[in-house]
Image (tube, rainbow, N blue to C red):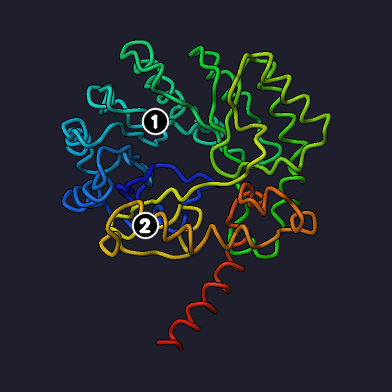
Amino acid sequence: MPNIMLTYRCNLSCPYCFANEFVNKQSTDITFENFQSAVRFITKDGPAFLGLIGGEPTLHKDFKRILTAIIEDRKIKECTIYTNGLELDSYFDEVASPKFRLLVNCNSPETIGETRFARIVNNLDILINQRYMRDRINLGINYYSDDLDCSFIIELLKRFDLHRVRLSLTVPDFSVCGTVSSVAFFRQRKQSLMKLLKQFSDNAIVPYYDCNKPPVCIWTDDEKQWIQEYLDRYGVKESNLLETNSLCYPVIDILPTLEAVRCFGMSSFEKVHIHDFDTVTDLASYFLNRVDCEAYRIADCTDCRACYYRKTRHCTAGCIGFKSEYIKKVNESVDTVLVGDC
């Protein structure tokens, strides 16, 4: 599902922000005309799903106009708003439309302050209990520190009788990822992650990975058995907690300038203009060839070299960003050859 970045502005300064190349570096908002161009590009192949991101998308000066345009556009099947939830009270009537889903990224009251946290809780209370959006709201947490106290998200989920949570494991800054093994990184965090999963299990909460799903090889047979029993206990038939694949398809994030990146995590890797491609499918294929295919070829460690899942393109050993410097070098050498041939 492609995303449209509405603004570089944000009302928080999260320590783990994966869009820090842009956020609060400028005050740029996408123009309404560029927003319409991005929507036409995304829906060129037919009705489509899309996401609204930032910064904090609710800060866009024409956010209500954008929401209304989405509601009225028959080519948009559904839209997910990625938000911190602070400003949702200004848009209750619009976001309650069946067109919208919300992914509310949650931070602890210690991080953002008690007043802000209380405002988010109040907004969720109204949307869930008065606007009946329970089935269209997901809460998310970014697990950016092994000693992060996650009791706040557990209490929040229990308050609203929600039993699923988006879990994203943050990774190091990609400028240093060329010196870090992704498998080693995830193995280092495994003990802390397992502790968190047990906390969720004790409270009838089953998380799902968003970005940065750890490769299955980090788990021992006993740990895999425990995770499977955890899923079985709550009757979860499908889950990515224990999938053998560790990969991600290009998201496609469209910037206010109508440049596009594979995903925010790799925003500094390469940017292209959407007008240079016929459809979003063509754009995704471009990044698949430039990034993903090379990521599978590069073995992260000795064990990866003979790994069946890597060879069959089911596992890249975690986040592709760890291999970004290697992929850049490969593409630079290929581009040099192509220019020479011309």
Badge 2 marks a residue whose secondary structure is: helix
Based on the displayed image, in which of its 4 quarters is residue 305 positioned?
A: bottom right
- Quadrant (top left/top right/bottom left/bottom right) for the C terminus: bottom left
Give neighbour class at mark 1: few <14, some 14-19, many 20+ (Cα, 10 Å).
many
Report the side of 136 relative to 317 (left or right).
left
Which badge, 1 or 2, comes first in the chain's sequence? 1
Residue 256 point in image, percent of width and height: 29, 55
Residue 13 point in image, percent of width and height: 47, 46
Residue 303 point in image, percent of width and height: 79, 54
Residue 245 point in image, percent of width and height: 63, 42
Badge 1 marks a residue whose secondary structure is: loop
Label total for image: 2
Q: Name the one closer to the observer, 261 or 19.
A: 261
The residue sitting at 30% across, 31% down in the picture is 78
Give amino acid for label 2: Leu
Q: Which residue is mark 1?
A: 85
Give amino acid for label 1: Gly
The residue sitting at 48% across, 27% down in the picture is 139
Report the side of 247 relative to 6 (left or right).
right
Give neighbour class at mark 2: few <14, some 14-19, many 20+ (Cα, 10 Å).
many
The residue sitting at 42% across, 34% down in the picture is 84
- Quadrant (top left/top right/bottom left/bottom right) for the N terminus: top left
- When the figure is inspected, residue 314 is found, relative to residue 117, above or below; the finding is below
Looking at the image, do the residues carrying marks 1 and 2 touch, with CB atoms under 8 Å apart?
no
Q: Name the one closer to the observer, 88 or 258.
A: 258
Q: Which residue is mark 2?
A: 283
